[in-house]
């Protein structure tokens, strides 16, 4: 038998370690629990939780996530790194500081507008007093970003460190060694305070936190 269904949301940049812990915990429950998984931005996942379309979501802390209707448990933190297509990586890796002029001339891959990584890219150029370049590609899928970098010799993007290393693992891109000096909001598990799945969500948060 099964104890019901859990509808869980994920941002695409959830770490492999957190994903493994999520499946390991949820798929070991007895009676078994049917899972429905949806990927989206934090903003959309939060809205889906509030509208009870999702039972919980692994996403980033956001300004509206501290309202009384939501519980959000901290899971782990991530640092952001520049990821550069292999043919251009050596030019940028030589410098210890960000070469904003050179970055402005490269082919950017941006995530959606309402994401912390997009805000970070805006901050990189705003801090240097430069206009944010127009992206050549907008994508939030890790596979799409990785594939695009295969075909963009001057491609560049910003990713959390663990996701960046996954994208660079095939040799078509390189992660620059220095993390960016802007903080990403931490990743947490969010659910409605009055949700009937509160006990399951709280247990999942504990399991993922212990693994990360």
Image (spheres, grey):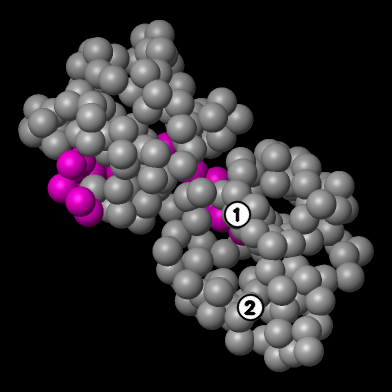
Q: Residue 13 location in percent, x, y?
A: 48, 50
Judging by the rendered image, the residue that carries numbered circle 1 is 10
Residue 26 tag number:
2
Q: What predominant SS class does the magenta segment belong to?
A: loop
The magenta span reads 169-188
Magenta stretch holds residue 177: yes
The image shows residue 41 at horizontal and vertical percentages of 61, 41
Residue beneath the point at 63% across and 78% down: 26
Q: Residues within 10 Å of mark 1 (few under 14, many from 20)?
A: many
Residue depicted at x 51% and y 75%: 21
Q: Looking at the image, is 22 positioned above or below residue 96?
A: below
Q: Is residue 31 above or below residue 57?
A: below
The answer to whether 89 is drawn above or below residue 11 in the figure is above
Find residue 187 and name its label.
none
In the visual, does 63 lie left or right of 135? right
Residue at 81%, 83% (x, y): give it: 3
Q: Is residue 7 above or below residue 20?
A: above
The picture places residue 9, in percent across and down from the top left corner, at: 66, 55
């Amino acid at each position: 038998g099964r104890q019901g269904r859990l509808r869980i949301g994920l941002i695409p940049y959830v770490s492999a370690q957190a994903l493994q812990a999520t499946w390991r915990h949820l798929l070991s429950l007895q009676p078994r629990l049917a899972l429905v998984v949806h990927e989206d931005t934090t903003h959309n996942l939060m809205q889906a939780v509030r509208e009870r379309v999702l039972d919980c979501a692994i996403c980033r802390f956001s300004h509206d996530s501290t309202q009384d209707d939501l519980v959000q448990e901290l899971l782990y933190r991530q640092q952001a790194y520049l990821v550069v297509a292999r043919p251009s990586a050596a030019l940028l890796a030589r410098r210890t500081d960000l070469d904003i002029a050179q970055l402005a001339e490269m082919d950017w891959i941006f995530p959606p507008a309402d994401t912390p990584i997009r805000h970070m890219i805006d901050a990189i150029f705003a801090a240097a007093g430069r206009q944010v370049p127009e992206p050549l590609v907008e994508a939030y899928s890790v596979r799409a970003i990785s594939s695009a970098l295969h075909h963009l010799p001057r491609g560049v993007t910003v990713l959390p460190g663990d996701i960046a290393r996954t994208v660079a693992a095939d040799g078509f891109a390189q992660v620059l060694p220095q993390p960016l000096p802007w903080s990403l909001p931490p990743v947490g598990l969010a659910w409605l305070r009055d949700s009937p799945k509160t006990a399951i969500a709280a247990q999942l948060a504990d399991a993922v936190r212990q693994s990360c």
